[in-house]
Image: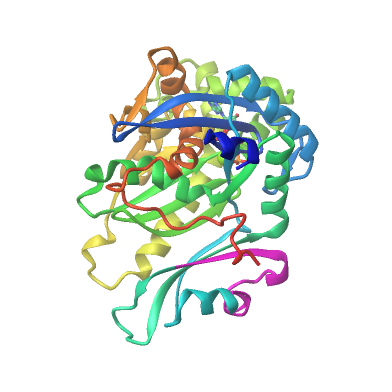
Amino acid sequence: MSAFASLFGKETLIGLDIGSAYMKAVQVEPSKGRVKVARAAQHKTPADAVRDGIVVDKAAVGDALRQMLKTAGISATGAVTAVSGPTVTVRHIKLPKMPEAALKKSARYEASKYLSANVEDSAIEFDILGPCPDAEDQMNVMLVAAPREMVESRVAAVEMAGLEAVGVDVESFALQRALVDCNVGAFSDGGMRALVDMGAAHTEVTILNGTAFALTRSIPIAGDSFTNVFKSQLRCSAEEAEQHKAAADLLLLLDGSGTAEELEGARLLQPMLDELLREIRRSIHYYQSQLPEGSERAALQEIILSGGTAQMRGIPEYMKARLGTEVVRGNAFSNPFFETHAESAGFLQEQHPRLMIGLGLAAKDALPATAAPAPAAVAVAAPVLA
Ligand SMILES: Nc1ncnc2c1ncn2[C@@H]1O[C@H](COP(=O)(O)OP(=O)(O)OP(=O)(O)O)[C@@H](O)[C@H]1O
Ligand SMILES: [Mg+2]
């Protein structure tokens, strides 16, 4: 919090999802036990400014963020942002029982047993979840690690936009917060679900065991892969390829309807999409293979989609037909827990798949005590950050 803001108690935070294709901002306010979505905005990320999750052009992203907030009328003092992708590690581990202070001291040593990356180059956070039921002297711990450069570049971009970087979370946790923790009643069957965030550079699969985080995996097939199919097959510009992609209707692949021209777009997408679905299925099978034999929780209840690529026409229906499981677009804005303004309701409903991570980041401090806490974030200022 800036000195000025803290003096007058006017700290206002936003959730900032800095994607490789789009930046999304969401501002919320607590409202009588619920959460009011005050404002939301999105803007194209400057070209090539975010690569492999790292903000490589911090000044360009900082400027664009500032512009986006100004245009949307969002005034804030700080932001919570997040990391994701194949270089981010989120793992349940078991450690000998020790107090939190001792764990902080040995964080790098303990983390080095689980990370392939150099711990010196990683931001590391541990969250003690509780005692381990099957081993008295052990405790269950969530390990979160991300390349230091990824975390620091996001903090720098936020600061260049004139905001304080209040925390760096994990995108999967933010999604879980928006879609599950704020709506626990809908998940009371305790079944297994997959949150699948389909962005531009990658698709992140997060498996939930009831309302509990189980694992996350990043797949390098997403919106850019589909745009590139059109670019190479039709030899067209990126802009034209985006238009072809948005026009393609995957439903036509299921019922065979449509003219040859209409079918062409969906057919061009199909092999890449099927490859992505194979990878999603593999992630689910991997998790199922870790469960005890005959486990009641091994059946997948549902796949919940988010991210801009989840806006592809007919994608829930196509996935449902191919994977044989319920597939929906997750929309926290239809949960009465989130209150929306009449004037922004249209934008939020139309763009909801892209705004779920930003919403989960913004809701981090606004959740009432009744909502289940999501696992700890990689707190920027926390001393444990190695
Ligand atoms: N209506 C649509 N139909 C098909 N694709 C769409 C549609 N709207 C957006 N997209 C695609 O969604 C992607 C952007 O989604 P999103 O904002 O979730 O990505 P991102 O967060 O920037 O990416 P990443 O998280 O992978 O870095 C782009 O590839 C874009 O082409
Ligand atoms: Mg994204």
> 302 or 23, which lies in front?
23
Q: Quadrant of ligand 2?
A: top right
Question: Is 244 on the left-hand or right-hand side of 292?
Answer: right
**Residue 231 x, y percent position in the rendering:** 70, 29
Residue in the foreground of this view, choosing between 66 and 270: 66
Q: Which residues are magenta?
A: 107-127
Instruction: Residue 201: say if magenta.
Output: no
Q: In this orientation, does residue 12 appear?
A: no
Residue drawn at x 56%, y 24% is: 41
Q: Residue at x 52, y 23 (%)?
A: 248
The answer to whether residue 334 is above or below residue 320 is: above
Q: Residue at x 76, y 37 (%)?
A: 48
- Whether residue 62 is visible here, answered yes or no, is yes
Q: How is the image coloured?
A: rainbow
Residue 144 on image: x %, y %: 54, 63
**Which residue is the extreme one toward the bottom?**
137
* Residue found at x 62% / y 24%: 69
